[in-house]
Image (cartoon, helix red, strand yellow):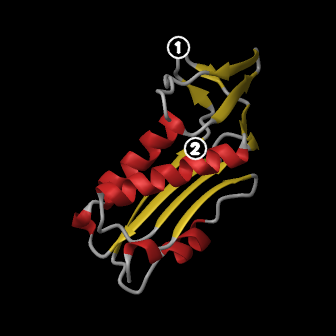
Amino acid sequence: MRPSDHPTIFQITEDELDLNALLDSITLTSTGAVAIFTGMVRGVTSRGEAHETVYLEYEAYKPMAESKMKQVADEIRERWPTIEGIAIVQRIGRLYPRTPTVLIAVTAAHRDTGVFDAARYGIDRLKEIVPVWKKEVGPNGEEWIEGDYIPKAGE
């Protein structure tokens, strides 16, 4: 199978993340390793002074965000040619503590072929370039959470 035929999923969704379905979608008969990163809503946030989070509200401009997710998947394939399947999924909407918000999963034939590094790269790069906005709501009010990323020309 050519790398261009390997399964790739990139999606913004309001639906609950179904890990089993996503893994089934990116697993080949040659797959022997999967690395998964899942981000969760924290009930207590330590950014600044520790405080309670009642829920997070995620928003995204879907066409742009999914285009950037595809870019992240393409970058993963370029850096780690042994990667077979890739899933990059971000939830939007109102999400409560202990709820998965994002999933990065990569598959390969063996664990020592870059799956761990590729998954880490996937979440770091998603946070850098994918336009998803997050509002934190707590008992004392709400605040839009700003990321550290400032786009460079061409990104």
Question: Measured along the vertical axis of the image, is residue 41 above or below residue 1?
Answer: above
Taking the image as shown, residue 98 lies to the left or right of residue 33, namely right
Residue 110 is drawn in which quadrant? bottom left
Crowd band around label 2 with a 10 angstrom C-alpha radius: few (<14), some (14–19), many (20+): some
Taking the image as shown, residue 141 lies to the left or right of residue 49, namely right
Residue in the picture at 33% in, 77% down: 32
Q: N-terminal of the two: label 1 or label 2? A: 2
Q: Residue furthest left?
A: 112
Q: CA distance from mark 1 to mark 2?
A: 19 Å
Question: Measured along the vertical axis of the image, is residue 14 above or below residue 58?
Answer: below
Residue in the picture at 61% in, 73% down: 21
Residue that numbered label 2 is attached to: 40
The x, y position of residue 60, in whole percent, is: 71, 40
- Name the one closer to the observer, 42 or 22: 22
Callout 1 secondary element: loop
Residue 51 is drawn in which quadrant? top right
Residue in the picture at 69% in, 21% down: 144
Callout 2 secondary element: strand
The x, y position of residue 85, in whole percent, is: 44, 69
Q: Amino acid at mark 1?
A: Gly
Residue that numbered label 1 is attached to: 48
The quarter of the rendered structure image containing the N terminus is bottom left
Residue 92 is drawn in which quadrant? top right
The x, y position of residue 6, in whole percent, is: 45, 74
Q: Amino acid at mark 2?
A: Met
